Image (cartoon, rainbow, N blue to C red):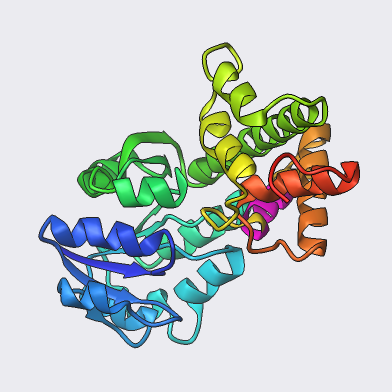
Amino acid sequence: MKLGFIGLGIMGKPMVGHLLAAGHELFVHSRSGTPEELTAQGAKACASPAEVAQHADIIFTMVPDTPHVQDVLFGEQGVAKALSAGKTVVDMSSISPIATKTFAAQINALGCDYLDAPVSGGEVGAKAASLTIMVGGSEATFNKVQPLFALMGKNITLIGDNGSGQTCKVANQIIVALNIEAVGEALLFASKAGADPAKVRQALMGGLATSRILELHGERMIKRTFNPGFRIELHQKDLNLALEGAKAMGLSLPNTANAQQLMNSCIAHGGAAWDHSGLVRALEIAANFQIAGN
């Protein structure tokens, strides 16, 4: 199958690798250029998103934020400039559910299908092809693309119409952020009280408090490995989407707001590019105490 993929960063690069390994023909584009290891595997580098859309039947996008998706799809050299009826656009970025509905309507007006399919699992999941993929769109389009999703992820769910996938991803990011904060507070408490945080984490892994966040990000907090992963600035963006949506719906999300403020603090201290487990640094700065290390 002729596929297009736009965005070859931490997530997109391994995802393209899985599609290539399955024997698909890939036309790719990235602002930062195409990694040599992908072209060595057969990926064909394109000069613009429009060129990708010209060659591919299904075009995937994986870029950082809503304005980037808008530019990739509808900019001067955007995907929409080269779409012909019957093609499919699949946005796997994490962006605004409201904007997603508008993008889908614009693509549908060109006689093409649209899926929003944000993912969870981070760099580890992208490399292992074990991503959770949350999809919004028609069942027929989902069924057509599902075999390709299966090459990149394990837990693949059609949530509902366009925008539903992005809504699910925002919900995911609320849960992840609050769990990171909870693990950070717990390990900070234990360490300040004089307990070995590594042994506390080991003990908690066997009880009701266990979680993937405690397993993966708790270890990062203890070992001080804050290289992404998933950057704090991107998670901050997702929580902003949650709070904007909550305001529009008249909802109060107090703990989401608190986690977003902690990420603001990290960014103010130079941590925009830290892994989101680095949220614990905001707690440590406030406490003038570090969980582990110097």
Position of 82 relative to 141 (above/below): below
Q: Residue 237: within the magenta?
A: yes
Res 280 quadrant in image:
top right
Q: Residue at x 24, y 41 (%)?
A: 143
Position of 160 relative to 152 (above/below): above
| Residue at the farthest left position | 23
Q: Which residues are magenta?
A: 233-241
In x, y percent, where is residue 274?
64, 58
Q: Residue at x 48, y 42 (%)?
A: 165
In x, y percent, where is residue 236?
70, 53
- Seen from the viewer's position, the closer of residues 180 and 60 is 180
- Seen from the viewer's position, the closer of residues 91 and 264 is 264
In the displayed structure, does residue 105 sit left or right of residue 260? left
Position of 220 relative to 15 (above/below): above
- Seen from the viewer's position, the closer of residues 118 and 122 is 122
- Seen from the viewer's position, the closer of residues 110 and 153 is 153
Q: Residue at x 40, y 45 (%)?
A: 137
Quadrant including the N terminus: bottom left
In the displayed structure, does residue 250 sit left or right of residue 178? right
Res 65 quadrant in image:
bottom right
| Residue 192 visible within the image | yes
Q: Residue 131: within the magenta?
A: no
Q: Residue at x 76, y 51 (%)?
A: 263
In x, y percent, where is residue 113?
34, 56
| Residue 119 visible within the image | no
Position of 64 relative to 97 (above/below): below
